[in-house]
Image (cartoon, rainbow, N blue to C red):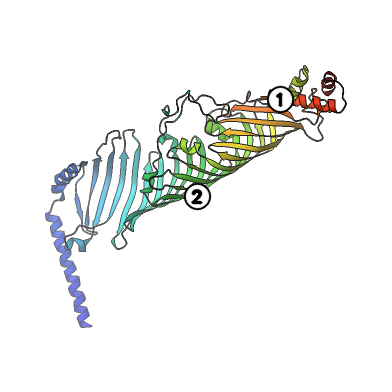
Amino acid sequence: MKALKWLGLALAGFLALLLLVLAIAIALVNPDDYKPRLEETARQNGVTLKIGGSLQWSLLPLGFSTSDLLLQMPQEPGKELQQIRIGKIALSLGMLSLLRGNLDIQAFDIDDLRFFTAETQTLQFREARLKVDDANNRGELFPVDLRIDDTRVTGSLAISMVNQALQLQVDLHGDQIDLDRYAPAETADANSPPDSKQPDAPGKKKDKKQKKEEPIAFASLLQAQGSYRIRFDRMVSNQLQLANVVFDARVEPEQIILNAFDADLYEGKISHRGTIAIPPGKQPVLQLEMRIEKVQLSPMLADLTQETPSITAGIIDLQANVRGNGATERKIMRSLSGVATLDVNNLVIRDLNIEKSACDAAAAAQKKELAVRQWPRDTLLHNLHAQGDIINGIVFIKPVTARLDTLGLSGSGPVNLLNETLDLKLDLTVREGAQSANDCDAISPAVRDVAWPLRCEGSYRGALDDLCGIDKSRLGKLIAQLATKNIKEGGGSLKDTLRDLFN
């Protein structure tokens, strides 16, 4: 026991002597003498370093600190000038490593670290501490408290070496972020001039402006392998207002796995899952499962288009499974394939009266003047349901069904997602229990069960007042079929048949 006691006293004395030597060394050595050498070493590596504050030693824990650092990173051709300003930094050193002649930075604290670009965007670390675990090849930055422009983010970041590859573990929570402020400016697309033709674009109109097709940096994303869980209370993306956003993903050597992208959206919810396979030397392949539940259409479209929407009410549910490949957004859209199911309840379309269109079709068929009346301005559709196969970015809908107050609606046709156009051929029939289309005097009892042809063709992005109208081609064939049927049933001559059909 006495031996252990004397050994303990000896160790304590040795540590006390070591601390005394370190204290004397710190008192005799002025770390500011090394500032010019540090700045020159940085300059030789292409980095401009200016240390505004004094270098100061600390004994417990052993290390040093300084303040007011400015780093200017080397500017590559075509890249923005970047500057880093650090308000205060303190480094903790491993004492045993120093005794062996090695410099071991075990931790550092940062207060007020800011990144600047030529566009005056700012990334500010309010507080951060790095903890290094040499035994497990792991470093953890916590607690992270940073500000990106007007966004505050807290959480933790960890980096480790696994199988000679860096692995990140990110867990962050932000208050709010506007992604649109970081989106590139829209420019003319050199690959798609305004007068170019798209063969599969029904009712295509010339685009005034398209985003330049910049390749998505999939390969760069693979360099940051690891797990990511990022949450935001509020987010703006493509002018859409999202809340309670959860992004959960994992980056692997040749793929990105999206475990979850969930958010609240206009009194409803969205939920996405999927993968992006990025095999070396091949086109990236996207697979995505999308779900939209109980989202209010009108405010969503108003924010998305920044215009007064033609749809003034409606609640949408959507399910889709899609697959696409390509290195740009438009190439992925052009290759998109899959299936989709859409349900919209209580859909109100402004400046479009479908019942009047059915009445106009009946009047045109018999060349009859309609009595002057005040039709409702809008159309209310109940229980709109559509299913479609997606092929090369075009949704081939079959069928689409809906219910109006006096009419039933059914039809089919393509919807081009890339060009935002559609070409739907619809049939309108008088519902059971109703006498005509909203008391249309052009529909006689003899033709009450006729399916009146309507066609909706053109861009669905803007106003819909001239989108739908009589399908004259199918209406002419309908008249001929009705007349032929009536003649075969002994209805007399063609002239008498047409008179009887529409009177």
Q: Which mark is residue 260?
A: 2
Q: Amino acid at mark 2?
A: Ala
Where does the image place residue 165, in percent across and percent down from the top left?
33, 55
Q: Nearer the viewer, residue 14 or 319?
A: 319
Q: Is residue 109 rendered to the left or right of residue 349?
A: left
Quarter of the rendering containing residue 358: top right
Tell me which numbered mark, 2 or 1, is placed earlier along the sequence: 2
Extreme residue in the bottom direction: 1
Label 2 secondary element: strand
The residue identified by callout 1 is: 357
The crowding category of the residue bearing disc 1, from other C-alpha atoms within 10 Å (few below 14, some 14 to 19, many at least 20), is many
Residue at 84% across / 27% down in the picture? Answer: 488
Extreme residue in the front direction: 488
Residue at 33% across / 50% down in the picture? Answer: 128
Q: Nearer the viewer, mark 2 or mark 1?
A: 1
Q: Nearer the viewer, residue 64 or 337?
A: 337
Residue at 62% across / 31% down in the picture? Answer: 311
* 63 vs 465: above or below: below
Is residue 356 in sight in this rendering?
no
Where does the image place residue 242, in percent across and percent down from the top left?
51, 41
Q: Is residue 500 rendered to the left or right of residue 365?
A: right
Is residue 107 in sight in this rendering?
yes
Label 1 secondary element: helix
